[in-house]
Amino acid sequence: MVSKLTFKNDKKRKREKADRSDKVHKAERPERTTAVVPEEEPEGWVSAETAEELRGPCMLVQVGPDGAHCVATDGAGRVSAAAVGDELEPSAVRQVLVIVPIVQSPRFALKSHAGKFVTVSKYGVCEATAEAIGPEQELEFVEAGGLWHVRSAWGKLLRVAPPDVRCDGELGADGALEADTALTVRVQARFRPRAAAAATAEERLSTRELETRAGMALDRDAVRALRRAARDGRLNEAILDVRERSKTDHRC
């Protein structure tokens, strides 16, 4: 049998041809890229802890001996108290208000599902009938221990007293905020500022770690305050404040 003729440079030419073929195939194949998975939007309702979180749809909830009730409105502009479950989430659109920041002011307005602003009279009567924002629609949200007190332009505090909602709460004799005006402000997680919604390493500091940094024992309120400060990037400043208050309390 006659064997196939071969030449000295055949192997070299075959290798070069194979290399060129590989290069062509690589150029034709699209480069494999790592798929970018979009970050999921947080869902559900959460309790607002800072003024920066007071935005978008909200619920104003007061938890009392008879359970939890929220501020609700109807199409006629009536404002009343509506019962809510233990999860503190709305079961009807009338239980949802919209927090509207007032430009160049630390105050807010509340808009009903019908698009009307909540008005508070000097006598504490609440109605959702206003078309625009004026002094009677401006409300101040005062944070205290994770809860909120809503103060009208008349200096009165909002109370959810089923079946009514009134804004005639008074400060205590010593100027302290009363428990019957303490509200939980529930907001939708997806509308919270990204920095507030994302749990950082500083926010996850345990009580023991915070006490180690502060060099002292901390009560629950101090721990909560330091965690909020950590989220805002001012933990060291807050620790100094806690130490100073502790020294003042001991001197007293």
Image: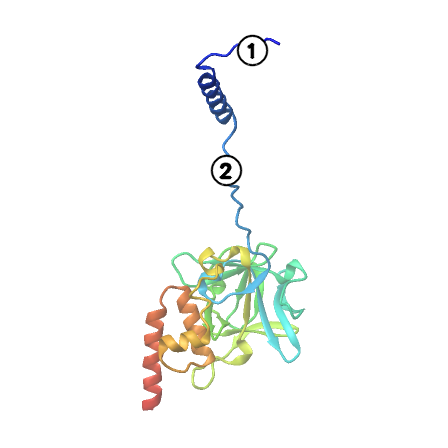
Kind of residue at disc 2: Thr
Q: Secondary structure at mark 2?
A: loop
Image coordinates of residue 26 in percent, x first then y, are: 49, 27
Image quarter of residue 225: bottom left
Crowd class of label 2 (few under 14; some 14 to 19; many from 20; radius 10 Å):
few
The amino acid beneath tag 1 is Lys
Q: Judge whether 207 appears above or below 93 on screen.
A: below
Q: Nearer the viewer, residue 21 or 110?
A: 21
| Residue at 47%, 15% in the rendered image | 10
Left or right for 73, reference 143: right
Q: Earlier in the sequence, mark 2 or mark 1?
A: 1
Q: Which residue is mark 1?
A: 4
Question: In this rendering, is residue 56 above or below 164?
Answer: above
- Residue 37 position by quadrant: top right
Q: Nearer the viewer, mark 2 or mark 1?
A: 1
Q: Residue at x 40, y 78 (%)?
A: 211
Whether residue 154 is visible: no
Can you say which quadrant of the picture contains the C terminus? Answer: bottom left
The correct choice, above or below, for 99 with respect to 23 in the image is below
Residue 129: image x %, image y %?
Answer: 58, 59
Q: CA distance from mark 2 to mark 1?
A: 46 Å
Residue 58 lies in quadrant: bottom right
Residue 224 in the image, given as x and y percentages of width and height: 46, 74
Q: Horizontal and vertical percent for residue 219?
A: 45, 81
Please, what secondary structure does the residue beneath circle 1 have?
loop
Is there any visible trace of residue 96 in the rendered image?
Answer: yes
- Of residues 19 and 126, the one nearer the viewer is 19
- Do labels 2 and 1 touch, CB within 8 Å? no
Residue bearing mark 2: 33
